Amino acid sequence: MTRAFAITWDYRCPFARNAHEHVVAALEAGADWDVTWVPFSLNQMHVEEGQPDVWDDPDKAATLRAPEVAIVVRDRYPEAFRPFHIAAFAARHDEGRDIREPEVLRDVLTGAGLDAQAVMNEVDDGWPLEAYRKEHEAAAGDHGVFGVPTFIAGGQAVFIRLMSRPRGDAELARTTIERTLDLVTGWPDLNEFKHTRIPR
């Protein structure tokens, strides 16, 4: 039976990178999951009282650009979303590139086989920003989401930090996400579980 869940992301977060790499690696290897990819703004969660929301603040526009681009790819070019998504995380965390910069996003889009200008034109149309705001607010309002990655399944929403990356091991990726989902949906009594020290 197909397993359905949603997972939030913000490209700033290395733990989101870890979780999304696991999900994508398992899907690419044939995992039978129905995944909803939910953009979430960590900047919005840290807006100080009395300050404008990031969606309405021109000074924050660059911080929203990469997720806006991803929304276009997800909604207009779904077959290219996974490679773009992982490449965007890699550009930020593995390559140390500034994905707020349009030139960097154009490179990532081109690398995923997309027409970068066509995607940027969609961003300029404004609808991706509205979609971003709507999905962020729904996640926060409907599920109490406060960070990334949050898994949402079976009426439960759980913020989870996975310490490892799949590094090409699709079976590790599949079992990692299956185990995570089993905890999310099957054991809601477990509210917090955090090692005091991380073995290295």
Image (spheres, rainbow, N blue to C red):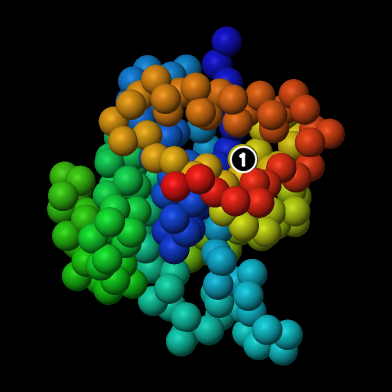
Location of the N terminus (image quadrant)? top right
Which residue is at a point 44% across and 69% down the rendered structure image?
64
Check disc 1 and report the residue beneath it: 151
The amino acid type found where label 1 is placed reads Phe
Q: Where is residue 97, by image quadrant?
A: bottom left
- Horizontally, residue 62 falls left or right of residue 189, namely left
Residue 163, relative to residue 174: is it above or below?
below
Does residue 128 show up?
no
Q: Where is residue 124, by image quadrant?
A: bottom left
Does residue 55 show up?
yes
Extreme residue toward the top, this view: 1
Residue 73, relative to residue 97: is it above or below?
above
Which residue is at a point 44% across and 33% down the rendered structure image?
23
Q: Where is residue 74, by image quadrant?
A: top left
Q: Nearer the viewer, residue 86 or 66?
A: 86
- Horizontally, residue 35 falls left or right of residue 183, namely left
Element assignment for label 1: strand
